[in-house]
């Protein structure tokens, strides 16, 4: 009985250390986490998260839907298409003034186009350095 308790305690402690976000080297000192590298158009960008981690963190699941308008006319709705890396983008805010602002830094862009109006779309910009999300709204 004593061995099973000790074994259970050891498993619990190992599980606790396995869930910690830091890594320890052989001397027990903390090492910084490895940064992700995103390759876009032949250039390498250092990022806090990979594109897959960004999608998971901010619920940016890729979806595509095709609507048949007439016999040979189709309309496509795309949600959260990865558009690439953008430096210092200008974003449009819906409710705040000034409406157009320039944000500084390097961002990964995820584009969503809707069918309600041709000019209605949203773009999620995620900062590569900090991992923060900024939304840009275009449309009516």
Image: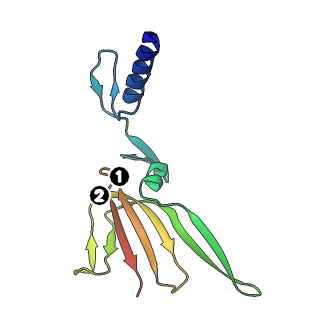
- Which residue sits furthest front? 1
Residue 82 at least partly seen: yes
Residue 43 at least partly seen: no
Residue 119 falls left or right of residue 136: right
Marks 1 and 2 in Cβ contact (< 8 Å): yes
Residue that mark 1 sits on: 128
Q: How many marks?
A: 2
- Which residue sits furthest left? 97
**Based on the displayed image, in which of its 4 quarters is residue 69 positioned?**
bottom right
Q: In front here: 106 or 132?
A: 132
Q: In front here: 55 or 18?
A: 18
Circle 1 SS class:
loop
**Based on the displayed image, in which of its 4 quarters is residue 140 positioned?**
bottom left
Residue 30 falls left or right of residue 16: left
**Residue 27: x percent and y percent?**
29, 15
- Give the residue displayed 28% in from the left and 78% down from the top: 100
- Which residue sits furthest right? 71
Mark 1 or mark 2: whose residue is earlier in sequence: 2
User: Mark 2 packing: few (<14 Cα in 10 Å), some, or many (20+)?
Assistant: some
Residue that mark 2 sits on: 105
Circle 2 SS class:
loop
- Give the residue displayed 24% in from the left and 79% down from the top: 96
Is residue 72 depicted above or below 131 in this figure?
Answer: below
Closest to the camera, between mark 1 and mark 2, is 1
Residue 115 falls left or right of residue 108: right
């Amino acid at each position: 009985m004593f061995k099973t308790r000790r074994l259970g305690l050891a498993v619990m402690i190992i599980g606790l250390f396995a869930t910690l976000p830091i890594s320890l080297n052989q001397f027990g000192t903390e090492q910084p986490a490895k940064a992700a590298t995103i390759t876009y158009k032949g250039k390498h960008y250092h990022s806090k998260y990979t594109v897959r981690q960004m999608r998971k963190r901010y619920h940016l699941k890729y979806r595509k839907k095709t609507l048949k308008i007439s016999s040979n006319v189709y309309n496509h709705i795309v949600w959260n298409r990865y558009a690439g890396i953008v430096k210092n983008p200008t974003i449009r805010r819906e409710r705040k003034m000034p409406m157009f602002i320039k944000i500084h830094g390097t961002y990964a862009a995820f584009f969503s186009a809707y069918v309600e109006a041709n000019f209605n779309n949203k773009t999620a910009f995620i900062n590569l350095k900090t991992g923060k999300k900024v939304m840009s709204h275009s449309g009516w």
